[in-house]
Amino acid sequence: MKIQQLRHFLFVVKEGGFRAAAERANRTQAALSASIKELEKTLGQRLFESGNKATLTSFGESCLPKIEQFLNTYQVLEDDLKAAAAGDKGKIRIASVPSLVTKLLPSVLVEYSKKYPDIEIVLIDDNAVGVANRLLAGEVDLALGNCTSMDQADIDFTPLISDPIGVVCLKSNVLNQLKSQSEKPQKRPQKKGLKWQQLVAQPFIYNGTCRLLENTPAEVLNRNARYTVENITSLFALLRNDLGITTLPKLAFPSNEPELVWLDLLEPALDRQIGIFKLTDKTISPPAQAFYELCIKYVQEHYPLSDMA
């Protein structure tokens, strides 16, 4: 029993005759009649009365709703599979560092959802190491984060933006005043910001992104840290209570922070490379591939770093 035979059966019923059904099926009447006869042979019963070939037998009447239900289900399945293959339906799982969840991903997701409204998106935020581990464990299809944690040969990393590292402190902190003084007109224009030596006298709060200071002169700040905090909410609570200073990528600093300030760090001048990555040895689903391509294109066109800070 073939799908096409069942469709021919429905065509005869709906069109009221073999000639009209043959035209709808784009087949000759003889070919369509042969298809119906083959179906009847398989079932072992006639589907249409011999005197009037458009009239169903009692057996044909009992078959009609079952065949209609089956073909409807089959059509839905076929449509869903084609939609999934085209990236129009399905689910994608994305892991991202928190700073991108707040500043970059929302706009990208808006654009993606306009093009693919039926795709379900599962978004997980984690630190850079956690994002990489989730991808390697197969928990997510794609990840966005810092390439310094991406030393795995089986990860395909595509850079998106360069995110500078700066100093975060209270606006009333002397470091902010020093930075303001450096902005006064000078005979020779100089880049504005702080040097790591100016930070040593301040209590330092270590957070996960401070590993970017490793193997630089500023690594001494990590070794002498008074506090170690992993959660960004806890970090900002300590900063607002004047318990110390820290370093953070610019994207991790809130745009409308009323009490704190982000200051450029000139020596050492550091940044983190933010990008999107996937497993090299695994073919991602069409919906995930569509997001991957859209994310790269959209960020490059709409999100220079100056617009994201």
Image (cartoon, helix red, strand yellow):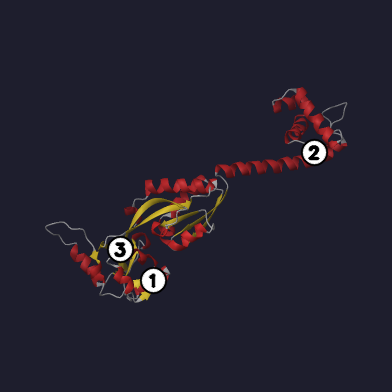
Q: Specify the amino acid type for callout 2.
A: Leu
Residue 126 appearing in the image: no
Residue 298 appearing in the image: yes
Q: Specify the amino acid type for callout 3.
A: Gly
Query: Residue 134, how many percent across, how many down?
Result: 50, 60
Query: Residue 300, how many percent across, how many down?
Result: 38, 47
User: Where residue 64 is drawn, which disc sits there?
Assistant: 2
Residue at disc 3, secondary structure: strand
Q: Quadrant of residue 197?
A: bottom left
Query: Is 40 located above or below residue 227 in the figure?
Result: above
N-terminal label among 2 and 1 = 2
Identify which residue is drawn at 45% across, 46% down: 294
Query: Residue 17, how many percent across, how many down?
Result: 78, 27
Q: Which is nearer the eye, 160 or 104?
A: 160
Q: Quadrant of residue 163?
A: bottom left
Between tags 2 and 3, which lies in front? Answer: 3
User: Where residue 235 is drawn, which disc sits there?
Assistant: 1
Q: Which residue is mark 3?
A: 166
